[in-house]
Amino acid sequence: MSAAAEHASPGSVAPEGPWLDMYSGMTTIRLFEEQVNDLYRGAKMPGLAHLYIGEEAVAVGVCSALRRDDYITSTHRGHGHCLAKGADVGRMFAELLGKESGYCKGKGGSMHIADHANGNLGANAIVGGSTGIATGAAFSARRRGTDQVAVCFFGDGALGQGLLYEVMNMASLWTLPVIYVCENNLYNEYTHYLESTAGEILDRPRSFGIESAEVDGQDVRAVFAATSSFVERARRGGGPAFLLCNTYRYHGHHVGDVDRAYYRSKDEEELWRSERDPLARFGAWLRESGVADADRLKALDDEARTLVEEGVKDALDAPFPDPSEVTDDVFA
Amino acid sequence: MSAAAEHASPGSVAPEGPWLDMYSGMTTIRLFEEQVNDLYRGAKMPGLAHLYIGEEAVAVGVCSALRRDDYITSTHRGHGHCLAKGADVGRMFAELLGKESGYCKGKGGSMHIADHANGNLGANAIVGGSTGIATGAAFSARRRGTDQVAVCFFGDGALGQGLLYEVMNMASLWTLPVIYVCENNLYNEYTHYLESTAGEILDRPRSFGIESAEVDGQDVRAVFAATSSFVERARRGGGPAFLLCNTYRYHGHHVGDVDRAYYRSKDEEELWRSERDPLARFGAWLRESGVADADRLKALDDEARTLVEEGVKDALDAPFPDPSEVTDDVFA
Amino acid sequence: MSSPSVAAPAGTRELTIAQAVNEALAEELRRDETVFVIGEDVAEAGTPFKVLAGLVEEFGVERILDSPISEAGITGLAVGAAMTGMRPVVDIMFGDFLTLVMDQLANQAAKAHYMSGGKLTVPLVLRTTLGATRRSAAQHSQSLHAWVAHVPGLKVVLPSTPYDAKGLLKAAIRDDNPVVFIEDKMDWRIKGDVPDGEYLIPLGVGDVKRVGEDITLVGTSSMVHVCLAAAELLAADGISAEVVDPRTLSPLDGDLLVRSAEKTGRAIVVDEGHRSYGVSAELASVIGERAFYHLDAPVLRLGAMDVPVPFSPPLEDQTVPTPESVAAAARELCGRS
Amino acid sequence: MSSPSVAAPAGTRELTIAQAVNEALAEELRRDETVFVIGEDVAEAGTPFKVLAGLVEEFGVERILDSPISEAGITGLAVGAAMTGMRPVVDIMFGDFLTLVMDQLANQAAKAHYMSGGKLTVPLVLRTTLGATRRSAAQHSQSLHAWVAHVPGLKVVLPSTPYDAKGLLKAAIRDDNPVVFIEDKMDWRIKGDVPDGEYLIPLGVGDVKRVGEDITLVGTSSMVHVCLAAAELLAADGISAEVVDPRTLSPLDGDLLVRSAEKTGRAIVVDEGHRSYGVSAELASVIGERAFYHLDAPVLRLGAMDVPVPFSPPLEDQTVPTPESVAAAARELCGRS
Ligand SMILES: Cc1ncc(C[n+]2csc(CCOP(=O)(O)OP(=O)(O)O)c2C)c(N)n1
Ligand SMILES: Cc1ncc(C[n+]2csc(CCOP(=O)(O)OP(=O)(O)O)c2C)c(N)n1
Ligand SMILES: [Mg+2]
Ligand SMILES: [Mg+2]
């Protein structure tokens, strides 16, 4: 629809945006992550988790432009990507809790959820570690003669990893259908990205001859439109692209990072939460543009809440894997 | 002198070019490498070597702009860099032959000659492997409060190594006095660089905010002038630079690479040898500009020839290290 | 030298290990279109060692792919391709460059299947080399197979003969797991009989290369030939040495090693990796643990000296076990020195 | 628990291992202005584990340097800085990221001195971690010290107590060679007495953490405490276990291990790396080779299971040796099970 087209890069034809699905998707991610935080604070979840709250528009905007058989690779902050690509809430909670019914039978946990059936080749606990995998999936799509594309999600910190430049070079040389999506949430853990990143980010992919663009990562329609045009271009054989999404994580680097004053100000956090919240902005637009009224959105919120509440309940009740499974799956 | 100034980048003040030393230096490298080739063909040298013939103007032009206490890191094709930074011909031959009197007591060989006294931190058999070392030497110079600079020599093939991008980012962030000198001789071994390198080479360092320039690597005065201005800028605290030198290796990738028709044409080789030879061009300029007449140059050629002949003779006569030395130098 | 596990069909030819590797790749490339080769100078050049010569002519540059000098990048690309239906064969020119691919190999390829609860599979083969005495110095002479053997999820193959190289490489390419296949640079020229017909050698089955009674010499890769030569020297002294080649480090055919050591009562493990914290320590420990009560002497280990490989010939030649040094150690272990 | 090699001066305080490491760094940073720390989030954050807390306040951002997320790059930079007069301490957050620095560590840092015939020196310390059971899953739980121990030219230190951590780290920083210093993530909280005054512990000298007569338990890093706890359990059964901590893998104090095993006649090596092709194989082999004729039973090895570390608690908890599993193995070895 015009809303999407209006945000599309020149020459692209943005498909009809399934706006309400996007709204539900973003809402589900937010509620899911709040639940994860509660699980941690309630000492119900083993280990740590990196919450995606504040960045929902990126995963949903990007994945809404993909087909189920398209690929994504994800990061340590991967719950949003995984849900946006179609994962089941309950099985995700189960994985975070190390349960048998989890996506990885409890073997992967928060940083390693993979959902092959929906094209998610896995979260990755090595910063930049999945850039080669996404590029290889795109290579494979070309070789197998399909029109699948691969999206590689990574954070601003991954710009420090040499592997990214090695694979962007090959993606460009071989016109591979891969889209590098850089989620710039301003921080590499506790260090501002400007302290670790020289020059202009977009000049890097461009120096390899990769089509690149920057978008407001808090505007799901903008992310969707930009991704759609890159995806369509890649399907046509137009080659790789790089999308820089400016976003922000509301919570700490991980659930345990609560005292953040030494690396970022409360004002900064407040500004992003109050002025740029992707859900609030999208909700407002949906109402103003008449796509849905307040009641409809409230209904969707309730649906999402029920989904999350039931999902976490089932996961909490689910059994752990049998100890004997520890030696399974080392080899195929 | 004006000749150099005329080639200097805008704003730089090129020092007096020691033209005749450069001529002798280039001649010595050429004769040294021809001798290395003979040693290989005569089965007098263990292993292989990567000849620098055709690229002499790069090493000499760059190193003539450096002080003895400035640093360089070198590559598998490192004889030229080593000689240009002041190494002794005889001790280099001795190292190539694995003799006790060699720069590394015979332990390093052709790909690992280091000459610490002259600031040469070593050749390196890992493509791109010394880019971190050069950057670290520059970091150290800054921390120790000296005005030393570090030059990192590498080939077009090293553009494929992620490490280069990791360290260029830090060099730019921390304004380190390092100059990245890319010797583009058109080939990564047996593959043309255009098949392995996407985009424009200079856009890569520029994307990290690094001052960059391209120069005719077969014109020693141009290389000297460009390097001089970058060196002077780095000494003043102006930060890193990247110099792309377009050049060509006349011989094979290594001494054993004699049948090259499958990856490059005889015509191409002939063109570079006949039209762009750095020694011939520089010699002609020296005569035309009246810096030296034919006899003077002939005398310098003879000096260089004697130096090389005596150096190889001594090295051939020199003893191998005592077998017991195999376990020395593992730890300092 | 044929494997006990597979009968070689009648009709054989003499091939070098390089030819056997080339033939195995050609057959699998023909058989399965998802197989492709990626590496530096693998196409027209057929690698600097010419081991892949001729493949690009038959299979084209789409399947024999020259890459930039990006070891980590091509390995990562191969992991993604393997997860999505392809069977990449990555060519890493020198084993010394394993240093550059360890993250993609150990953190990604080796763990993806387990971390995903068995959902993702990474059927890739990474071919690389080991071996010194080539006057290539410290950064082109290492034998780093101990590193990859230590990583659960990776299979590690060290062929020592043309017959083994072909059968094991074909099995590795068909295996659904990441396999590191390591060839000795100096042994590519070694000749041996290879059957005309197709055959596979299962990963995890060792091979007795020479039967003996008095002492067991366990050799890997290049050291199998050193052990066989040592066995000849020992025979002259009336010592009958059995030479056992595990062929794969993981899975490891520990039973074969233990049975032989129990029979002979004495064992020496010879491997070209550095001696300390090397593969020889694992093989010696397996024998020491399981055959302890049958051993008449300690299990000895011979490996590369614990020094970076020096360039100078008289230095380098001392760093690797030789038939003489193995035979000397064996004589001493047998109380005959 | 004090080292036999150095007498601890009177007056001690109780510190955690984390505090001891922090104190060692602070003292060396004060003493020698060429020392600096570089790593991710090491400055204001003091690392995610807060081990370096307070250092940037005293030494400033020029000497406690936050880097981009470029493990290979900062290690390479450190090698060059070390060659030219500085003494870098590189902080690699998780030992799992050693995968990214192996080229700069093994091909550059470890070999530069030898390849240059002794001219170049690389006095750098690379601090990193090991250890599982933190629910961090397969890519944040590995113990990869076997890889670096296999590389000639690298020294490898595995402290197990606050006293050892401080004395060994100070010695490592003053050492003219590249030293990999590996701390257990779970043991940073362990407390112990540390003398007020300055002291150093030479690299290459092991330490007997508990004297015993019936069996030798060789433990490294985290496993020293598991062995000590196992020794308590065994004492209850009337088995007197000696616990030996090599403290450094290279140089290795083999004599100490061998003397203890000769005395007790039985030995078990316990290390948190994967069991196969791991550090335990080397230590067991050293004992097996040199103490063979004094051994009443085979030398056993206990290590992490040969599986990628799983996330799920009931799975992960099985993968690492425990006091109970070590004691059970010891009882069996002593024929008391
Ligand atoms: C190679 C590597 N180095 C360091 C780490 C530790 N680490 C985990 S997340 C992180 C910061 C990543 O920042 P960014 O890429 O911007 O992602 P974000 O957390 O902001 O989403 C770091 C340094 C890691 N996991 N992998
Ligand atoms: C990391 C690494 N990969 C591969 C090689 C094998 N190799 C040696 S030289 C070379 C080509 C280098 O090309 P370039 O950097 O352009 O240097 P040139 O030989 O042209 O001077 C290759 C691939 C190596 N030494 N190191
Ligand atoms: Mg970030
Ligand atoms: Mg080149």
Image (tube, coloured by chain):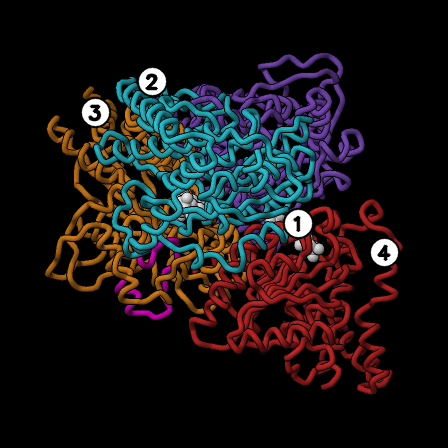
Chain colours: A red, B cyan, C orange, D purple
Vertical placement of B212 versus C8: above or below? above
Provide the residue designation for mark 3.
C331
Residue A285: name its quadrant. bottom right
Magenta stretch, residue numbers:
C26-46
Element carrying mark 4: helix
Provide the residue designation for mark 4.
A268
Element carrying mark 3: helix
Label 1 with label 2: CB-CB less than 8 Å: no
Please identify, in this view, whether the residue under mark 3 or under mark 2 is nearer the observer.
2
User: What's the distance in space between the residues labelled 4 and 2, CA to CA?
Assistant: 66 Å
Question: Residue B264, position in %: x, y?
Answer: 33, 55
- C267 in the magenta segment: no
As shown in the figure, which amino acid type bears the numbered disc 4? Answer: Glu
| Disc number placed over residue B209 in the picture, else none | 1
Closer-to-camera residue (D31/D325):
D31
Provide the residue designation for mark 2.
B324
